[in-house]
Amino acid sequence: MKREVLNYTDKKHFSPKSNPRWGKEEETEIFGQNVKLFRKGKMSEDDFRRFRLQHGAYGSRLQQNYSMIRIKIPSGEITPDQLEKIASMSEAFSIGSAHVSTRQNIQLHWVQLEDVSEVMRGLVEVGLTTREACGNTVRNVMCSHFAGVCPDEEFDSTPYAKAIARFFLRNPVCQNLPRKFKINFQCCSNHGLVRIADIGLIPMKKDEANGFKIYLGGGLGAASFIGHQLEEFTPEDRLVSTCMAVVRLFDRLGNRENMARNRMRYLVNEMGWEKFQKLVIKERSNVEMTISLETLNRYKVDFEGPSIRQLSNGKKLPLINEKVDINSDPYKRWIHSNVVSQKQNGYFVVFVTLGAGDITSNQLRSLAKTIQSYSGEGCARNTANQNFAVRFVKGRDLPEFYNDLAKIGLANPGALTMSSAVGCSGTTSCNLAITNSHRLAKEIQSKFIELGLDTEDDLRDSTIKISGCPNSCGQHEIATIGFYGGASRIEGTMTPTYTMMFGGRDGEEGMLGRTVMRVPAKRVISTIIKIIEIYRQERSANESLTKWIGKLINGAVNDNGEIKNLDDIKKALMQTISLPSPDDDPESYMDYGNDIKFSAKTAKGECAA
Amino acid sequence: MKYTSKEKKTKSILTRNHTLNDLQDVITSADILRTLIRKNSVRVVDVRKEDEYKKEHIKTAVSIPLAKVLDNDSPERIVQLLEQTGISDKTPVVVYDDTFGALAARVAWTFQYVGHSNTSLLETTFAKWKSYGFETEKKVNVFPHAKHSLRVNNEIFANYNEVEKAKSEQNRILIDSRERLNFLSEHIPGATNLPYTMLGTADSILREPQEIKRFMENRGISTDDEVITYCGSVGTLSGLAYYALRMGGVKKIRLYSRSFKEWKKLGKPIEEFKDANYWDLSAE
């Protein structure tokens, strides 16, 4: 597709993104053929499932005839023509909406198995792939959406993230790992998910040389771990060998028997960090001595991208700091919670608020045009918070940008605040889900925007993240207030409930949340609102909700207050979480999106297949 | 992607590699219709609302709104409508709408059902036609009354009995052409979903025949199968599917024009899927 010419005289600073060609057409043909073989009984169910997952098609909830197609967006960088193609693929073969995941994938749900190859065919045309988006492989390589524009970064990690993604894609070394493997890049110590990845990398410089601070063995799940730092500094020329060494060790030593405990974090935990660390260092030497030129040539860092480098004087990404409230002009309210300035003077990152990552085909098409018109780098990034970040937008274009979004219903405020709750797909499509976490996240968002909570500055650095089961796709353990779905018997009735956690966080100082209590699904919103109310009474001076919760879990809050620790807040919330009898209020015992009695139905997960 | 009228013209001629006779079967390209209009050898039927027609329509078109057809679709009445608009047994008819072909398809099918086989769909919608700068006019066209025979073609029609039979017989395939989420919610047991959204593109109400063929092959539908299409209520979406599958080469195909609405009203069995909250994934 031809790129529209930007109106700016300074457009010459930017080079258009070339088609990255992650996809391969022959793979779509093979997929189509294998579906036919499977349908005719000429390919076993196990073989087909393994093949299907390797190519990014996940089974849908209790319905194996439909797939969720997971499109990898390496480093989250996506071009307008790719967005347009996803829009038309969703319209034709899926449900007319696409879903931004928490790992920079874009997912199309409820695609008939027979049509998966058609969707893949369309994606290949615009350079996208679903290859190794599921299955026991190196999954999508993530990169902070601020990489390249963050004032605190040492250098842009995006080209490295893409090079590593390309190095491992279709690489024989990782086609059959004991379990999935995740690699995340940050930009600085704040932005990203390095402590909850198998390999997490933060760019750093030593004596002017580029390199990385590498964390290993983190990850969220039924049992979660925070990653360990490998060494003080890993120079960039050892990046590939270090990653190779870790993948090879995991491939060799990882548990292939017990599906529930075969992520690398369990290996690290069982072996002990010091021993694992030594093995990695040793394995790296072996790799470096034996790596073939052919293998090494798979790794190529391509430094294309905006050449504008007018660095400002290292200020933090400032939110546009004009105080707003619920009665403020909608545009001001949006600016306040959706726009931050970049390290490049005069340029801004605009966040597009989605509801739990969902966007219609029509919205995608319009958004593609908006990106084309206003982003100086001619692309966008999808983020772990399930929205889009459009970068290199000029200040003078912000009103037009807002108008474009308002026309298609995408101008909601709150993208960078607590009101944009993260929710995995839950019972809308996932086999493992117990609760409808997806709908709950959307309900929270609309309630918070209605109450104007996106305008409250003391809440803005807090996050709400929800998973529909303990498996953490909603990343609930790194939220200020996190929830994961389950089922409890209340008053003799099976009820959808969420276990609430406090005090998790992302970034290099990543921390796992602490379990507080169980809350019935239909009491989650009132519970959060009650927590905010208590916090406002109890906090000292202007401390933020995040800070107050942090002190609460450490039992270090203000002595004059009533609420000093988690037990106190549990007691204070008992009234809020209590339900009337099932006969008086049957709806309180049902899940969101259902008008029938709740029952916890799940089937075998496929991540591990 | 938008085409200018010139590009569009080239595209039509290059990609739709049919003869006029083939096209009369299912679809007529904009260029061919323009030629036919110039030669005064076609009756163009506009199925939009009458006031839309009065505002502007394709040159020489007559107005037969879908609502008028559905109001009373007894074969006798339909033949009357044909005669009133000057359509005789031999007149080539091209039908268009302003949605994505589904309304036109339902009307075209009705004409063929009462025996007017020489009916086809315009490949594009009125809005596109206009955007290409092709000929339109405002005047209400009246043609002399014509004589049309009535030969009901029951081979392209299905009632609920035929649908019931399809469930039990091999090589009989029931196609539900509603959108995915509607299909998941409930459908006639044994039906295959071929959403109407798969059938067209931004530029044409139906994709290229080879694409439709591939979609069929993917679903294991062969051109020798007997197919029945249905949709939600009056047979518009399934009308489009009817023509798509014909274009894909299916020889025996029927439209269950009373569709799921009648099926449900009659209390026939339905298949539901309630184990997932898929509606909550929609961003609408």
Image (tube, rainbow, N blue to C red):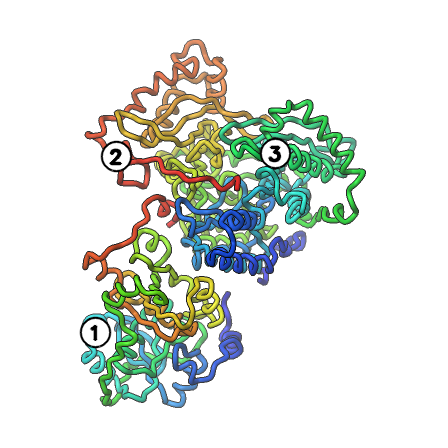
- Same subunit, labels 2 and 3: the answer reads yes
Q: Chain of mark 3?
A: A
Quarter assignment of residue B172? bottom left
Amino acid type for the residue under numbered disc 3: Asp
Q: Which mark is residue A198?
A: 3
Q: Dot 1: few (<14), some (14–19), or many (≥20) neighbours within 10 Å? A: some
x 75%, y 30%: residue: A282
Q: In the shown orientation, is residue A390 left or right of residue A91? A: right
Image position, residue A4 (x, y; %): 57, 60
In the rendered image, the quadrant that contains the N terminus of chain A is: bottom right
x 30%, y 36%: residue: A598
| Residue closest to the eye, A602 or A436 | A602
Quarter assignment of residue A227? top right
Amino acid type for the residue under numbered disc 2: Glu
SS under mark 1: loop
User: What separation in Å lies between label 2 and label 1 (alpha carbons)?
Assistant: 46 Å
Residue lying at the far top of the rendered structure: A559
Image position, residue A344 (x, y; %): 63, 42
Q: Which mark is residue B73?
A: 1
Q: In the shown orientation, is residue B35 left or right of residue A247? A: left
Quarter assignment of residue B128? bottom left
Q: Which mark is residue A587?
A: 2
User: What separation in Å lies between label 3 and label 1 (alpha carbons)?
Assistant: 66 Å
Amino acid type for the residue under numbered disc 1: Asp
User: What separation in Å lies between label 2 and label 3 (alpha carbons)?
Assistant: 41 Å
Q: Chain of mark 2?
A: A
Labels in figure, total: 3
Camera sees residue B129:
no
